[in-house]
Amino acid sequence: MDTDIPIKNRYGVNVETTRTSEIRKFKSFSEFLHLKESGWARGVTIYPVRSFVNDSVTSSILLFDKVPILGFLVSEQLKNELEENGFSGIEFRPLEIPDEEWYGPNGLRKQFYN
């Protein structure tokens, strides 16, 4: 997870942000939300860098309304059905590819979407 910590000037105005990164496992999504909400009260933004879905999850779609960086996740089966039925304007980033490798001028995104 990445943590953005605001740096304030002597007037209490945010002038800069420092970022720290750490690898951390959470037993549940609610544990992550608890950490996120406790940091939010201090102006700290905490968000996942890379997410994993347990193999036991059977839902075709997972909505993360409390973690906007994720948005939602869809199963491979639902992705294929959407593409087969001509849906367009939707970008599917494989979950195992981190943002740094996906976006950017030489990102993997260009290989998936020309």
Image (spheres, rainbow, N blue to C red):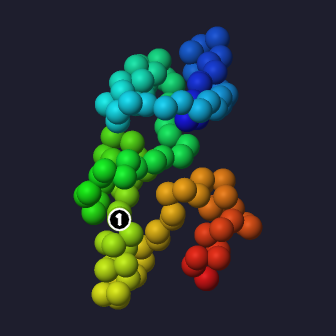
Query: In the displayed structure, would residue 9 be above or below residue 113?
Result: above
- Is residue 83 at all visible to an observer of this figure? yes
In the picture, measured across the screen, residue 15 lies left or right of residue 81, that is right
Image x and y of residue 22, in percent: 62, 30
Mark 1 element type: loop
- Which one is in front, 78 or 37? 78
- Residue indicated by mark 1: 75
Q: Quadrant of residue 66?
A: top left
**Residue pictured at 64% horizontal, 21% vertical:** 7
In the picture, measured across the screen, residue 43 lies left or right of residue 101, that is left
Image x and y of residue 41, in percent: 41, 19
Image x and y of residue 106, in percent: 74, 67
Binning the other alpha carbons within 10 Å of mark 1 as few (below 14), some (14 to 19) or many (20 upward) gives some
Query: In the displayed structure, would residue 18 be above or below residue 95?
Result: above
In the rendered image, the residue lying farthest to the top is 10
- Which one is in front, 10 or 45? 45
Q: What's the residue type where badge 1 is placed?
A: Ser
- Which one is in front, 65 or 28? 28
In the rendered image, the residue lying farthest to the left is 59
Quadrant occupied by the N terminus:
top right
In the picture, measured across the screen, residue 38 lies left or right of residue 2, that is left
**Residue pictured at 48% horizontal, 46% vertical:** 51
- Is residue 33 at all visible to an observer of this figure? no
In the rendered image, the residue lying farthest to the right is 106
**Residue pictured at 64% horizontal, 76% vertical:** 111
Image x and y of residue 12, in percent: 57, 15
Q: Quadrant of residue 35?
A: top left
**Residue pictured at 73% horizontal, 66% vertical:** 105
